[in-house]
Image: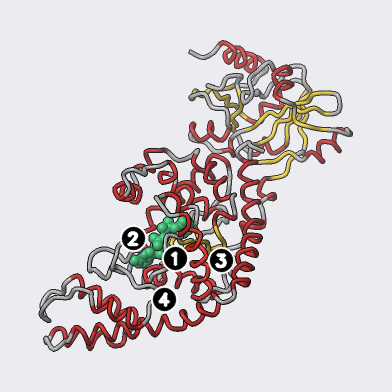
Amino acid sequence: MTDKIVLDYCKKMEELGIKNKVLEHPPLVEAAQVVNHLGYTLDDSVATLIMKADDDFIAVLRRDVTKISFKKIKKLLGIESLRIATPEEFSKVTGLEIGTARFYVPNLKTYIDKEVFGKKYILGGTGSLNYTFQCLSEDLKKLPGVEVVDVTVPIEQEKSHSTSVKRVFSGIRATGRLHLGNYLGAVKGFLELEKSGEYETVYCVVDVHSITTPYDKNALAKNKREIIIDYLAAGLDPKKSIIIYQSEVPEHIELAFYFSSVVTIARMQHLPTYKDKVKQHPDANTMALLNYPVLMASDILIYKAGLVPVGIDQEPHLEVAREIARKMNQLYGTDFPEPVRFATKGEYIPSLTGEGKMSKTVVNSFINLTDSLEKIRKKIRSVPTATAAGGEMSPGLKTLFIFAQLFIPSEVEGFKKSYQDKSLQFVELKDRIAEAIYKELKPFQERRAKISADQKYVDEVIRDGAERAHRIARETVKEVKHKMGLL
Ligand code: AMP
Ligand code: TRP
């Protein structure tokens, strides 16, 4: 049953010669949500704005994909002051609830922006949050006392400069020092993209993500700084890349909350990464943990980054970020890119135990970037191998060959041959790999020692990064707040 106020309105419109249809939906206030529910876009909907022009109220009809130009209206009407009516004024003038404004507002001078006729059929309010009105745009010219005017600018022109810049974003949690898996799976990608000179690169220590599982606060404060030093020692150039702590750009957290309004609890609960963490910490199944992927989406999208250098394990989180971007764009007309992963050759570094991936949280699974040659040799020697050469390779031996492929690619064939003809000495292969890994890490360790001795420089990098990141993040949050009706 259609509400009486809706039926009366439709009848009045028919009498004015405006044929129409009403579409039913759950009670929704935001035009973006209504059109989405009905299978249309904001391109199809027209809003009626009640405005106070000097001492009089006026109605302005504009397409939702356009923005009112106050300057144009003032000039057109020759008035001094112009503002949107307050909610109280709106109710008084229209007799309707906010969010239900109709095309026809009796006794009010009505201006129709020319863009309204850019679409043959248009959608608008009916006086009820449950129904939407549809008619031919041309028919609106039949409304009593209307005037067609040019008072809007397309929203496209308002787009910020930031969307035209190609950006890269990535982050690493501050749960411990970086290991070889982080270096090969992530940091090498950071470097490659920075060096390409094609992108604005933002690299972050995601310290807020570190508090989503139980942690030691003293260790966190220390670790997060160590990772910044690792970034610099790996060769990231703070003149080229923006290097930041996540917690110093609190807009990440603010945007994550706005994003959480378009993500269901069920979607987050089904993520394998979430389930794993709950299994690891059954007593710490917190809201922060459930929100982890939403905060990660915010990290990336606040910079409108389209490319994310991370290991393959992060793919499910990137899928969530893409879903959020799509949903936000659909509902609120934002222009978030759908971020994709930038893969490195070392996108999956296995654990030294021969089982699973190299991980900070699994003892004896990793090589630290600061490990000495002796330590690396000892760790590699401990990788379990099959007792005899030949036949099917054991998981540990497969791991060794993955390292060989990454660090001594030209020697792989030779080692494989000697494995097949059973002449391979495992310790020979292991020591060769250990040496090659150390050779790659040595310049890193030397640079690290220098940077650690200059803490003032590290402070400067952090301060400068926060400032540059802030400028971009603030702009995105402002845009989102505006488009979500918060500003
Ligand atoms: P995490 O230490 O889990 O915070 O990971 C930081 C970054 O390193 C992410 O981009 C991960 O995908 C990457 N990463 C972690 N472990 C590995 C691994 N074993 N192989 C490849 N990439 C990894
Ligand atoms: N989840 C990532 C990891 O565990 C860390 C992370 C948080 C991240 N926010 C990000 C990575 C944004 C890339 C982009 O490694």
Instruction: Say what amino acid the circle numbered 1 marks.
Output: Phe
Q: Is mark 2 within 8 Å of ligand 1?
A: no
Q: CA distance from mark 1 to mark 2?
A: 24 Å
Q: Nearer the viewer, residue 304 or 228?
A: 228
Q: CA distance from mark 3 to mark 4?
A: 25 Å
Residue drawn 53% across the image and 42% down it: 257
- For label 1, the crowd category at 10 Å Cα-Cα, with few meaning under 14, some 14 to 19 and many 20 or more, is some
Percent position (x, y) of residue 451?
Answer: 55, 76
The first of marks 4 and 1 along the sequence is 1
Q: Is residue 340 visible?
A: no
Q: CA distance from mark 2 to mark 3?
A: 28 Å
The quarter of the picture where residue 29 lies is: top right
Percent position (x, y) of residue 171?
Answer: 48, 61
Percent position (x, y) of residue 13?
Answer: 64, 18
Q: Secondary structure at mark 2?
A: loop
- Viewport quadrant of the C terminus: top right
Q: Which mark is residue 201?
A: 3
Instruction: Say what amino acid the circle numbered 2 marks.
Output: Thr
The residue where tag 1 is placed is 342
Q: Nearer the viewer, residue 213 or 334?
A: 213
